Amino acid sequence: MHVSLDEARSSFAALLASRLAAHELAPLAACYGRILAQDLSALVSHPSATDSALDGVACREADTLQASPDTPARLRLIGESRAGAAFPGAVSTGEAVRIYTGAPLPDGADAICPVEQLRDAGEGHTELLRPASPRDVRHAGSDFRAGEVVLRAGQLLTPQRVALAAALGHARLPVRPRLRVGLLSTGDEVVEPGERLQEGQVYNSNLYGLLGLVQQSGHETLMLGSAPDSPRALSQALERAGGADLLLTSGGVSMGRYDLVRDLLIEDGEVAFWKVRMRPGGPALCGSWRGTPLFGLPGNPVSALVVFEVLVRPALTGLPTRTVRLRAGENFRALPDKTAFWRGVLREGAVVEYPKQASSVLRSLSESDVLVIVPEGQPVRAGEEVEVMLS
Ligand SMILES: Nc1nc2c(c(=O)[nH]1)N[C@H]1C(S)=C(S)[C@@H](COP(=O)(O)OP(=O)(O)OC[C@H]3O[C@@H](n4cnc5c(N)ncnc54)[C@H](O)[C@@H]3O)O[C@H]1N2
Ligand code: MOO
């Protein structure tokens, strides 16, 4: 019986839940691509003191309101404020302090005039050619305040967010555990790239798609090679994954005599679901083998990678699939009982269909820009908006 996309996602997530529940502390430099496990608050405020956004002078705005090249505001220079060496005194009417970007604003000053708008007036004075601006004062805590939650549990740690975490004052971050994911390709016909290909054989492209996708999702991979179509060879290959948190297989989940992965689960584990209301990827299989969660991806190369994006990645990252809406540049057909994920190409601000949609055409993923999501029985007309995933 075919399950819905939501049922498939929650069923797989439930199988992984206990393994993903823990968290560990990782140094910042090891956090790229990992998932934050707890909310993160700022340990300090930024800026830590009210400071200047420009190199120039700090003064009182009221002294400079009429300043122009013809009627410059003449101010007496009384000192300097540098990052790390604040001016110790206060600025009074008619006075200015030289200041540099990021240096603390002296007491009494409320505005900045940049160096490009200054003219030397001799005798320890400077002339402002335009009014000093309070907008170039950066107030303490205006970016974030100590104690404020700035990053949220579940966020993917991109380089930008790791940089922000460093700015918040954290040296180590609570991250979700890395699962060890065993990857196994199945099929007598599957051959490693670099070897000689006989007629009827196919190179093991699925492995090289899945390897990268698992790593991109923040987890470790364990290469189990490929297994021929025999129950014994299959279980021997999976045994090599001792200690894996998840087994990811490709091929052998459809209706053929040699589609053996499901039999393996029936005999030595449990089937959580088999067949999902989606295309490509209908025959996806999920369950556990000897207590280890197993996801059986279909062998067709497009199906394997699309099922990963739609069903596997959300569970591995804990993040929902990110979609955007685009204008359809042509009609997209719907399937009566399956959500379709058609490969789409961006053209003139709209999305059109990639010409070859067969699940065996791996080029369709390489040459398309998005996966167009067409819900069951709801065709999309040209000009309407359609939801897409980046592929
Ligand atoms: N009678 C039916 N036949 C099929 C059905 C069906 O419902 N009834 N479903 C079709 C669909 S949809 C898909 S998808 C495939 C899935 O089949 P399997 O998961 O059993 O995969 P295989 O039969 O082993 O291989 C399918 C195809 O993919 C190539 N392949 C396999 N492994 C790799 C790999 N590691 N790298 C690259 N390519 C691979 C394989 O050579 C086949 O061409 O079943 C349909 N059939
Ligand atoms: O849906 Mo299969 O997964 O199209 O070839």
Image: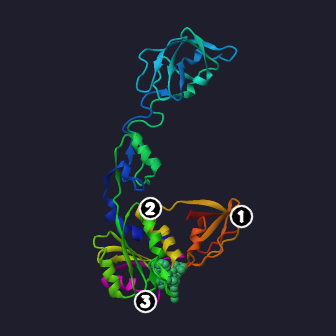
Please indicate, yes or no, whether residue 130 appears anywhere in the rendered image.
yes
215 w.r.t. 106: above or below: below
Element assignment for label 2: helix
Quarter placement of the C terminus: bottom right
- The disc, 3 or 2, on the residue closer to the chain's N-terminal end is 2
67 w.r.t. 224: above or below: above
Characterize the local packing of mark 3: few (<14), some (14-19) or many (20 or more) Cα atoms within 10 angstroms.
some
Element assignment for label 1: loop
How far is mark 3 from mark 2, CA to CA?
31 Å
> 205 and 45: which one is in front?
205
Residue at 40%, 60% in the rendered image: 218
> 47 and 311: which one is in front?
47
Say if disc 3 is inside 8 Å of ligand 1. Answer: yes
Which residue is tagged 1? 383
What range of the chain is rendered magenta?
253-282
Residue type at numbered disc 3? Tyr
227 w.r.t. 329: above or below: below
